[in-house]
Amino acid sequence: MAGKIRIRAQLDGDTCEVKALMRHPMETGLRKDQAGEPIPANYIEEVTVTHNDKVVMHGYWGAAVSANPFLGVRFAGGEAGDKVTVSWRGNTGETGEGETTIR
Amino acid sequence: MPNSRIINVAACLVATVMLTGPAHADEAGIFDEYRAMFGDDNPAIFVIEEGEEFWFASQGPKQATLEACDLGLGPGVVDGAYARLPRYFEDVDRVMDVEARLRFCMEELQGRTPEEVDDRPYSLRGDLGTEMEALVAWLAEKSRDLPIAPGQEHDKEREAYSLGEAVFYYRAGPHDFSCATCHGQEGMRIRLQALPDLTTHEGAAVAYSGWPAYRISEGVVRTMGWRMRACFRQQRFPLLDMGSDVTVALQTYLAVTAAGAPMAAPGLKR
């Protein structure tokens, strides 16, 4: 399920509330496995939320964010049926994205 | 300048004292405050979606879905089924909790092996959630607000209750612990966690109705079966098998003590 983002976008008055769950291990690179070998860093570096292809949130994350990050964000505007996407890019170059419509 | 710096330091000290003061006085309330900050935000809403997808997914050698699975209210009936578990199932002549029943359906309907189903029912460190956790989260959601009503008509259901009660008070292991050691008194806590008194209806209702739950510190949904296994581990007891008679008995004991209270799962826990 890695890479897939589950999203809900719901209107609350004149703002739209977006909630998203990203399945990601968010390995810091500082931990060791049971054999004592370092576990390579693997975390989300960049997160973008768009509304009808317009960026409404863009952020830089790092190793301090928990595994399976849960993102909540509100933006002004938006109407039922509009497209909302959430995407991330990891330090390994891996990407993930999800799409939903506002309800 | 030096004067203002001193004042700043003093202000910081006062602020520190004010912040730590009430925290120590009211430790039980801290997590309630934290949870309140989450509002309606429970990541479990997405695990529920996954669970629904698993239910309708063709899997195993028979490439079958779980749609024909009988959780006690008839094949395929999921609304309200969770709140009526654990209960006696005639086709296997034993009492089952939701996990034991799901495992049975996976094996019977989908032809999956016990080894595969039992391999990793609960997430280990670094896992992103399991099929069992997702299915249980979805089924619990389908019983939200319904009264907890485990079966107690059949002899085996009453036997399960008695066994569960006996296990609850059974002291053993290197720490000479029982479930009741932690969960048999009012108003106790371990570290910062308030411990519910599971021998009372109120305590059991709060505990039973809130599982499965999204566990913030672990980033996954945990089930009641996992909670039982974790308690056994903390007591340094042998590994508690998913869906075993002992875990079913303990859950029956809890569910009967909590009976009548509305289900509120999937909940949100520390």
Image (cartoon, rainbow, N blue to C red):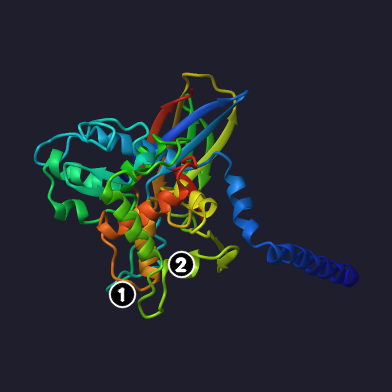
Mark 1: amino acid? Gly
Most extreme residue toward the right is: B3
Label disc, if present, on residue B180 of the rendered structure: 2
Dot 2 falls on a residue whose secondary structure is helix
Residue B259 can be seen, yes or no: yes
Residue B101 x/y as whole percent: 24, 45
Q: Quadrant of residue A35?
A: bottom left
Image coordinates of residue B117 in percent, x first then y, are 19, 51
Q: Please report, as a chain letter, where disc 1 is located.
A: A
Which residue in the structure is indicated by mark 1? A36
Nearest the viewer among B113 and A86 is B113
Alpha carbons under labels 2 and 1: distance apart:
38 Å
Q: In the picture provided, is B82 more to the left or to the right than B100?
A: right
Q: Which amino acid, mark 2? A: Ala
Q: State whether residue A44 appears in this view.
A: no
Q: Nearer the viewer, mark 2 or mark 1?
A: 2
Which quadrant of the figure contains the N terminus of chain A?
Answer: top left
**Is there a contact, CB below 8 Å, between mark 2 and mark 1?**
no
**Residue shown at the point (60%, 63%) measured from the top left:** B187
Q: Which mark is residue B190?
A: none
- Mark 1 crowd level (few <14, some 14–19, many ≥20, 10 Å Cα): few
**Quadrant of the image occupied by residue B171:** bottom left
Mark 1, secondary structure of its residue: loop
On the same chain: label 2 and label 1? no
Residue A54 in the image: state x and y as whole percent. 50, 28
Q: Nearer the viewer, residue B127 or A24?
A: B127
Vertical relation: A38 (above or below) B137: below
Of residue B12 and residue B165, the one placed in the foreground of this image is B165
